[in-house]
Image (cartoon, rainbow, N blue to C red):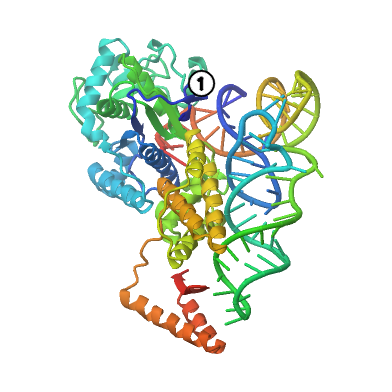
Amino acid sequence: MLRFYDTLTSEKRDFVPRIEGEVSLYSCGPTVYDVPHVGHARTALTYDVLVRYLRWRGLKVVYAANITDIDDNIIARAQREGSTEPEIAATYEKAYVDQLDRLGIVHPDHRTRATEYIAEMISTIETLLERNMAYVLDSGVYFDVSELADYGALVHRSVDDLREGAGARVEVDSEKDDPLDFALWKAAKPGEPTWDSPWGPGRPGWHIECVAMSLGILGPGFDIHGGGTDLAFPHHENERAEAVGTGVEFARTWIHSAMVNVDGEKMSKSLGNFTTLADILDAFDPRILRLLMLQTHYRKTMEMNRDALEAAGQALARFDALDRTAAAAGLASADVDSQIIDEFVAAMDDDMGTPKAVATIFETLRAANAALGSGDTERAAVLTSTVDELRGVLGIGTAGASGASQGEDEAIDALVAQRDEARAAKDFATSDRIRDELAEQGIVVEDKPTGATWHRA
RNA sequence: GCGUCGGUGCCCGAGCGGCCCAAGGGAAGGGACUGCAAAUCCCUACAGUCGCGGGUUCAAAUCCCGCCCGGCGCUCCA
């Protein structure tokens, strides 16, 4: 039985999709005004693995994710750089998608942009006005928090508590009825991009876009709404308020993935520990980052640093080593071990227990190596196939092509063959010299009963 | 301050009432294999106060209360 921890109810609950066998998922993507960082990767990866797993389990998944392509930050950057909002958004959306592609993140079925849903947002706002859940001021249209009974439910705060925080920290628009009331539509300001609306030219508030897109694509009462925990308030709380305010059922389960810390703190430019995704993926095999992240549960804050990445790199090398060993032994593909699969499924079904699932794979990996070592190729084939199957579910595939030319590879083959001859003749001086030469080129030679193999370090 | 999540070996990190003298990964020591390596396997030390103090229970890392410490949220944020 699939179970997920639901932020709204603060408990793990059995997951029953609204349509049997079909899961609808909406996940909040980034505001594209800068290059993506490792935090974006963790959030994207959480839902990537969820989608991969559900599909592997035989469920149909409709996955929608948004791109916020209009907001204060984008406008500010466009003005600063003498560019335009669409240009800034397009540039950083591409940067985001490009980096996620390197990580092998599955593409959502619907990747929508806020500016493509203006009409739907306006119509949602009209509904809220009709139902007296909102009011119009010169500065825009605002949601009336006092009209919603359980505002604050997602973050488990009372309206009074929230108001205390809002009054103390947010510059209160004195016109607003309540400091907690938030903008659905912002009236045009000079120099800003605008869209026409019944309330004059302006642009949408932040939260309304996700309501329009998620309900527009997935329909009322969709199964899962995801995003990073930092979005729980105010963004998700306000989304929920807006959607419920229109009288429809919103997300049935709320999943929030935790933050990535660098040097024990949330990364930020001001702290100087901002770690871009590109920097990490340039320095490490993308599968290393994926494995490292999956070794921590998605709801737990994780630490990201060079040591952790290097440790994960060593772990990943064991997968690649098994690939080589299995290939050298000529293992045929075999049926998977159903008991191990069951163990994996039990771990994943329990609120996406990827750390335990990964542990199961490593145990199987060791057993496969042991079987190989003892000459039990039949068992080794079963275990290796099981490892491959489960790696696939988590997106930890085999090593990619090195990018080296065929000629280079042939030259290395020739040297390795030459070394084999020298070894056969017990000319170890020569064989060691060749091995050292290859090592300098980053080539590791391994002697196996079936002959030497080599790979790039 | 309020809310929320957490504090487990040298490091990372599962477990969340008995199966725990606590998974898995990394690093460390020993052995096997190897001409020597690499890879692999086996063994060992690592946690004997699972942040601290109370309590509940036949039984607690796991539940309850209090305290200390940290992340995140309360402000744009994945």
Which quadrant of the figure has residue A85?
A: top left
Camera-nearest residue between A133 and A434 = A434
Q: Residue at x 51, y 21 (%)?
A: A156
Name above or below for residue B50 compared with residue A236: below
Q: Residue at x 40, y 59 (%)?
A: A332
Camera-nearest residue between B11 and A53 = A53
Q: Position of residue A326 (x, y in %)?
A: 46, 62
Which amino acid does the dot numbered 1 rest on?
His
Which quadrant of the figure has residue B59?
A: top right
Camera-nearest residue between A146 and A232 = A232
Q: Seen in the image, is B42 located left or right of residue A45?
A: right
Q: Position of residue B46 (x, y in %)?
A: 74, 51
Indicate the secondary structure of the residue bearing disc 1: loop
* Residue A61 visible within the image: yes
Q: Position of residue A453 (x, y in %)?
A: 46, 73
Q: Position of residue A123 (x, y in %)?
A: 22, 20
| Picture mark count | 1
Q: Seen in the image, is A416 located left or right of residue B58?
A: left
Chain holding disc 1: A
* Residue A274 visible within the image: no
Q: Residue at x 24, y 29 (%)?
A: A188
Which quadrant of the figure has residue A411?
A: bottom left
Name above or below for residue A441 compared with residue A396: below
Camera-nearest residue between A107 and B71 = A107
Tell me the crowding category of disc 1: few under 14, some 14 to 19, or many 20 or more residues within 10 angstroms, Cα based: some
Q: Seen in the image, is B3 located left or right of residue A235?
A: right
Question: Label 1, on which residue?
Answer: A156
